[in-house]
Amino acid sequence: MKRKQIIVLGLVLVIIAVGILQYNYGDTGESYDEDTYGRLPLTEAINDDNEDIPGAAVYVNGTDSSAASDEADDQQVQATGYFAEARMERNRVRSKQKDELKAIIEGSGDAIAASSLTVEEAQQQLIDLIRRSEIETTIETLIKQEGFEDALAYMSDTGNVDVIVKAESLTAVEVANISDIVVRHANVEMENITVKNVN
């Protein structure tokens, strides 16, 4: 019984935190659309040997070795901003999705008319969305505890997890450790994990 109470308390705290964020940032977000925003650019993998292994996590190197030193400094400034901006955008999109689902659950006439979801489906999607947000936060925290300056995790509703780590490069051991964190906490298969570094 205590475990259920802890889970319910956790969900209530997450909903309160979302409400505070929504109040502070207003209702200016938009739904994520791959056609509008595109996917994150992925450059070539540094360890081509693992690409053909079924079930291996994909590591993508986000650095450009031919960049001049001036550009490297600019990239470092952009990377710091990149993590903050990407996290804010992710949270903004999630907040908008939560608001839309809550409107359906609460029985708003316009929201129900505009959606094909039932109240039960909207409730399940809201729970899934909150669960994914908690998993992403846990993954980011644990990756930072491994010694990385910053990390960003994005878990899609299809079970794919993209992890971006602030680092000049990643060793095979570091990629394996990051992938292990994701597998343990997101309960996904290795082939659904993509690890990328940004410096």
Image (tube, rainbow, N blue to C red):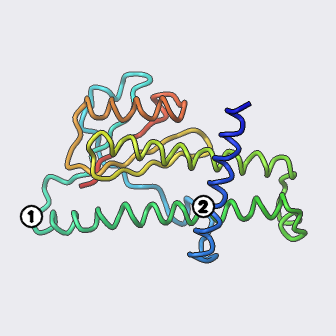
Q: Nearer the viewer, residue 27 or 141?
A: 141
The residue shown at (27%, 26%) is 49
Label 1 crowd bin: few (<14), some (14–19), many (20+), radius 10 Å: few
Q: Nearer the viewer, residue 179 or 131?
A: 131
- Image position of 138 (left or right of 168): right
Residue type at mark 2?
Answer: Ala
- Image position of 170 (left or right of 196): left
Q: Which quadrant is home to the C terminus?
A: bottom left
Residue designated by label 1:
69
Query: Helix, strand or loop at disc 2?
Result: helix
Residue 153 vs 52, above or below: the answer is below
Residue 48 vs 124, above or below: the answer is above
The residue shown at (45%, 28%) is 190
Residue type at mark 1?
Answer: Ser
Label 2 crowd bin: few (<14), some (14–19), many (20+), radius 10 Å: few
Query: Helix, strand or loop at disc 1?
Result: helix
Q: Which quadrant is home to the N terminus?
A: top right
- Image position of 90 (left or right of 15): left
Q: Position of residue 62 (x, y in %)?
A: 28, 50
Task: Residue at the far front: name it.
Answer: 2
Label pair 1/2, CB-CB below 8 angstroms: no
Residue 157 vs 172, above or below: the answer is below
Which disc number belongs to residue 17? 2
Residue 92 vs 63, above or below: the answer is below
The residue shown at (63%, 54%) is 13
- Marks 1 and 2, how far apart at CA: 41 Å
Q: Which image quadrant for residue 60?
A: top left
Q: Position of residue 21 (x, y in %)?
A: 58, 68
Q: Position of residue 43 (x, y in %)?
A: 31, 48
